Image: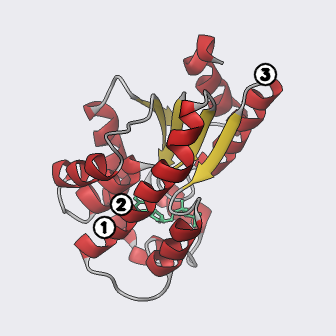
Amino acid sequence: MFVTFEGVDGSGKTTQVELLAAELRAAGRDVVVTREPGGTPLGEAVRELLLGGATISPWAEAALFAAARAELVETVIAPALERGAWVVCDRYLDSSLAYQGLARGLGAEEVLELNLRVTGGLLPDRTFVLLVDAGESERRVGPDGDRIEREGGSFRERVAAAYSALAERFPDRIVALDGRRPVDDVARAVRENLGAHV
Ligand code: TYD
């Protein structure tokens, strides 16, 4: 199974990635945990470029996220899935659809097309989107985020709205959960959704 977690900054996805991985390991599963952008030497270098100070034009930004993702799929995710492991990823292509496609306005279709091309069409089996609104995200992250987190109020609102839109658009793959609920409640909902697979 290839499972991804998505949401605005401060939605609690990283905590849920760790809880699911621990649960799967306790059940004796082979689990690979990874994150985006990053997860490979190239990906970490691209992460520095993306989240550092410099301004990056919108398609260059989308292409850099896609380059890091291509490397991660080729060298980490696909080999793990081939040997039958679980892969749990903190962000994947839905982040590009939400941030670059919808919030920056490049177009969800166009960004999806780029990402399907560079990943060989690899979509997650299940994606959990943790929904929190822009105000809650800002309260949790504080003023000192990375370059993308510093975008300010209306960008955050567009990203939050984008995730709700994506959940409606891909109902078979994406499960939307209320990220304001207690951590254990969200973890239980994830487990119940994966049910028999675990
Ligand atoms: P993340 O690693 O979740 O941030 P942190 O670890 O600092 O909490 O993500 C870094 C930022 O990159 C985040 O603001 C979302 C953004 N991002 C995109 O805009 N597009 C993408 O495709 C990905 C993977 C992340």
Scheme of colours in the image: secondary structure
Q: Any atom of ligand 1 within 8 Å of the CB at mark 2?
A: yes
Q: CA distance from mark 3 to mark 2?
A: 33 Å
Identify the image quadrant of the C terminus.
top right
Chain-order first, disc 3 or disc 2: 3
Residue under the point 68% across and 47% down? 15
- Which residue is the site of mark 3? 27
SS category of the residue bearing label 1:
helix
- Which residue is the site of mark 1? 63
Mark 3, Cα crowd under 10 Å, few <14 / some 14-19 / many 20+, is few
Q: Is residue 191 above or below residue 156?
A: above
- Which residue is the site of mark 2? 66
Mark 1, Cα crowd under 10 Å, few <14 / some 14-19 / many 20+, is some
Is residue 12 at all visible to an observer of this figure? Answer: no
Q: CA distance from mark 3 to mark 1?
A: 38 Å
Could you tell me residue 160's position as x and y percent? 38, 52
Could you tell me residue 78's position as x and y percent? 50, 41
Left or right relative to 194: residue 93: left
SS category of the residue bearing label 3:
loop
Could you tell me residue 101's position as x and y percent? 25, 57
Q: Is residue 41 above or below residue 92?
A: below
Left or right relative to 118: residue 90: right
Residue under the point 19% across and 62% down? 106
Tag 2–tag 1 contact (CB < 8 Å): yes
Residue kind at label 1, given as amino acid type: Ala
Is residue 10 at all visible to an observer of this figure? Answer: yes
Residue under the point 21% across and 49% down? 113
Left or right relative to 87: residue 6: left
Q: Is residue 71 above or below residue 113?
A: below
Residue kind at label 3, given as amino acid type: Ala
Could you tell me residue 180's position as x and y percent? 57, 42
